Amino acid sequence: MKAEDLQKIIMGTEQAAEMWGLSQDHIKKLCRQGKCVAVQIGKTWVIAKGQENPKSRRGE
């Protein structure tokens, strides 16, 4: 798989924060809690782009 193809399906915490209107720290917390489809590689979170905004799932 090419890097360009990966960029279409994954994002980092900075891009997720911009896309979802949340802080990067909050995105990282959601990842640690398993509330996002994500995997941690070293200190970096890799997040699936095609998932629902976790902000819209508050109260679950």
Image (spheres, grey):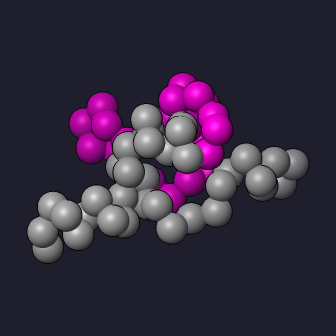
Rendered location of residue 24, percent (x, y): 51, 29
Q: Residue at x 44, y 60 (%)?
A: 48
Query: Magenta stretch containing residue 36, yes or no?
Result: yes
Q: Is residue 23 above or below residue 52?
A: above
Of 12 and 29, nearer the camera is: 12
Count of numbered labels shown in the rendering: 0
Furthest toward the bottom, the residue is 1
Locate residue 13: give its quadrant: top left
Rendered location of residue 52, percent (x, y): 64, 62
Q: Residue at x 36, y 66 (%)?
A: 9
- Is 10 placed left or right of 57 in the picture? left
Of 11 and 46, nearer the camera is: 11
Furthest toward the left, the residue is 2
Query: Is residue 31 visible in this depiction of the protein?
Result: no
- Is 39 placed left or right of 25 in the picture? left
Locate residue 22: give its quadrant: top right
Query: Magenta stretch containing residue 59, yes or no?
Result: no
Furthest toward the right, the residue is 59
Q: Is residue 8 above or below residue 29?
A: below
Quadrant of the image containing the C terminus:
bottom right
- Is 2 placed left or right of 37 in the picture? left
Residue range highlighted in magenta: 20-45
Q: Residue at x 19, y 64 (%)?
A: 4
Query: Is residue 37 visible in this depiction of the protein?
Result: yes
Quadrant of the image containing the N terminus:
bottom left
Q: Residue at x 54, y 37 (%)?
A: 17
Q: Is residue 28 above or below residue 34?
A: above
